[in-house]
Amino acid sequence: MTADQIPEGSRSRPAVEIDNVYKSFGHLQVLQGVSMTVREGEVACLIGPSGSGKSTLLRCVNHLEKIDAGRIIVHGELVGYTERNGRLHEMHDRDVARQRRAIGMVFQRFNLFPHKTALENIIEAPTQVLGMGKEAAIAEARVHLEKVGLSDKAGSYPSQLSGGQQQRVAIARALAMRPSLMLFDEPTSALDPELVGDVLAVMRALAEAGMTMIVVTHEMGFARDVGDTVAFMDGGVIVENGDARQVISEPRHARTQAFLAKVR
């Protein structure tokens, strides 16, 4: 679906609702009452210093981390839990896995199978999880490889690809599950500087096509130019959240101003 094909009014609908979420690891409180909404077709960027809770929040959205309190709703469905008589009960693993199918995630590290080619990496989940026929999965995988500019690398193994190429294969692999939401956890942080642009270009194209995205990033130019909204996190809370260009160019909070002064 391209941006101009998004049904009229759908951008006003919430795709992700994060409501007063808390998460701790032992005595370390990582998220302290985080709330935010991402609407259909929006790109929401999370910025902030290391250890501020950005990646943990992203992992909570698809229940890779279990929250301690609050709730997360994706496309109208409570993530990871069912509610009965006002109390939350954790879902069975198979139901959580079903929810995750609609949520693509791209990590800092590429996590490709080293013994499989780019094409084989991409068709693994559609054939094994979605039950797609191999020929159909291969045809679709080639479309995704073309989208990420790697049509000529279908038969290459990860060791034969640059870091940027591996990350683009990882994006194609996530897209092969036909997600309605994409999560990116600092997808360029492990790349050499000259390889960053190709990955960001793929993400920009996804945004222009209307994909709903939450992106943890240190790339301020991308956040300003591609993001619809930017949330600055520090100490497990959202300090400032608003229009991407306004937050990046004219931050209102002193903590946001101090952070951006160091990373620009």
Image (cartoon, rainbow, N blue to C red):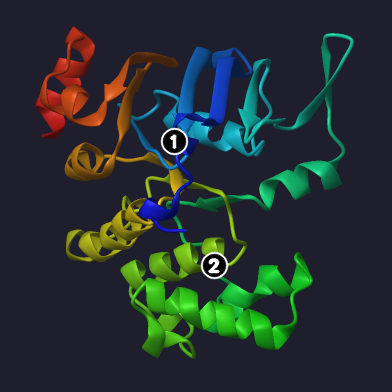
Q: Is residue 162 rendered to the left or right of residue 174? A: left
State the image coordinates of residue 26 (x, y, percent, origin top left).
Answer: 64, 18
Q: Secondary structure at mark 2?
A: helix
Query: What's the mark number on residue 173?
Result: 2
Q: Residue at x 26, y 39 (%)?
A: 218
From the viewer's perspective, is 109 left or right of 249? right
Which quarter of the figure is the C terminus placed in? top left
Determine which residue is flagged by label 1.
Answer: 11
**Residue 252 visible in the current orientation:** yes
Tell me if I can see residue 118 in this picture.
Answer: no
Question: Residue 246: where, in percent of width, then height?
Answer: 17, 23
Out of 235 and 102, give the one closest to the viewer: 102
Per the rendering, the mark at residue 198 is none
Please indicate whether residue 94 sits to the left or right of residue 160 in the image.
right
Image quadrant assignment for residue 204: bottom left
Q: Is residue 227 above or below residue 203?
A: above
Residues under numbered marks 2 and 1 in contact, where contact means CB atoms less than 8 Å apart: no
